[in-house]
Image: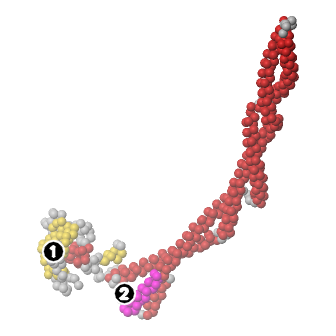
Amino acid sequence: MKYLKQLEIINFQSHTHTKLNLSSGLNIFVGESDQGKTAIIRAIRWLFFNEPRGSGFIRAGETSCEVTVILNNDVKISRIRDDSKRINRYIIKKPNQEEEIFEKFNKDVPQEVQKELGIYRLWIDKDKEFELNIARQLDSPFLLSETASTRAKVIGRIANLHIIDGAQRDILRDIRGLGRRKNDLENDINNMTETLKEYADLPEQENKINKLNIVIKKIDLLKEKINKLEDIKTKLNNNEIKIQNINTFLNKLQFLEISSEKIIQCQEVEKHLSKLETINKDIKLRKEQAQHFNNLAEKLQYVEDSAEFLSQLKETYTVFNDLGNIDSQISLCQKKIQTINYVITKTQNIDNGDNLIHQLYELRIKGHEIQELKRLYDERKKNYNTIKRYLEKYKNLDSLEKVINNLNYLNQSYINVLNISENYYSTKDDYEKSSQILSNIEDKYNKLIDNYIATLKEAGRCPTCYSNIDLNLIDELTKNLSDKNN
């Protein structure tokens, strides 16, 4: 145990320089009043607790003071204040070690000084403290003037029972908090259970959603088919209009069936016309020669060479006969020319015949395509009627938009239920963990109660009032502590 071996006081109140050697037992200071006995206690308090504050305790006429103690372990502790040099410090000097200087500690005593002295203030409440090591001059006997609760707190603090009390308070606070937490979790579980009841038909609604999703997909497919059919129908109508126009045009060109033959005939007629023009020129020449011969015959009717003239005349007659045949051929050719001119008049657009034939060939190909489109149209029309019957089957639905809104609502409800279910299981896990913690705390509390009761039985006295404790009192105390736990 530590004790003061030496006390030195310099310029503290009435002490100019006082040095006291103390024994390990009881030390008594005697003397007349106002001789500095109380100043010794004040000097020790100034060293121990840094009180009184300020510098009013410095001896009159001086600017500094110092209080030094040497402990039985030769540790030297000094408290120094010098207003002229603005010094306010504690100094610790341990054997064979350098000095430790502490400044700027405000109103508290440095922890290192308290540790070396082994002296602390005892705090009972936030605003109440006790100096256990020093009793002032006019103080009443220790604790007798205090209330029973204060005495119990002080004794419990000295005996370190405040640790058990603090642990008990913390445990009770934790128990109350966990109890509230337990009740809150149970209420949450009940609320979630009631909320889940509203979604009891969720599997059925989910099946409906799945069925309606299938129906919606089928409707979307049917819509696509309907759109395709509408496009095909539009194309078919356009093609039918084109076919009608083509048929009208073909009706106007019925006579084109003989166009190829007429063209050949026209080519032959052109050849005959060319020949006829040549023959006509030859006929004119022959007529001129015949006229010339007639003139010669008149002039030479008395010519002796009549035989040669007759011979020429025969040739001329033959030529005239040939010309008669040619005239008949010319008449025939003129009739053919009239026929050809009529054909040419009727077929004045025959130059476009090749284009028309090409167009007819393309129209024939389009006709085959139109027939194929008509076949597809009939097939799509059949599917369209099937779709129409299918839609009439579901005509009791108010509208597809309403169904989709219901699906969205059910889907959102399903998501909400999943979130609630997840929160439920999370809350349930928290509840189980809290219950386990509460159970561990209760076990720990019961063990502390058992240890406390065992300690009381072993001591046989109350740590507060030191009265004897019998078994009935211990049983009652055990029951009260158990009731608090419950």
Q: Amino acid at mark 2?
A: Pro
Q: Disc number at residue 463?
A: 2
Residue 208 x/y as whole percent: 69, 65
Identify which residue is drawn at 34% across, 81% down: 157
SS at circle 2? loop
Q: Please tell me which residue lies in front, 484 or 97.
A: 97
- Identity of the residue drawn at 43% across and 93% down: 471
**Residue 51 sits in quarter:** bottom left
For the magenta stretch, what is the residue range?
440-464
Q: Is residue 476 left or right of residue 125?
A: right
Spatial distance from mark 2 to mark 1, Cα to Cα? 40 Å
Q: Quadrant of the N terminus?
A: bottom left
Q: Residue at x 69, y 57 (%)?
A: 221
Q: Is residue 455 magenta?
A: yes
Main SS of the magenta part reads: helix
Q: Residue at x 19, y 70 (%)?
A: 101
Q: How is the image coloured?
A: secondary structure
Please state which of residues 337 and 38 is positioned toward the viewer in this rendering: 337
Q: Which residue is mark 1?
A: 9
34, above or below 382, in the image: below
- Mark 2 vs 1, N-terminal side: 1
Q: Position of residue 61 (x, y in %)?
A: 13, 66
Q: Amino acid at mark 1?
A: Ile
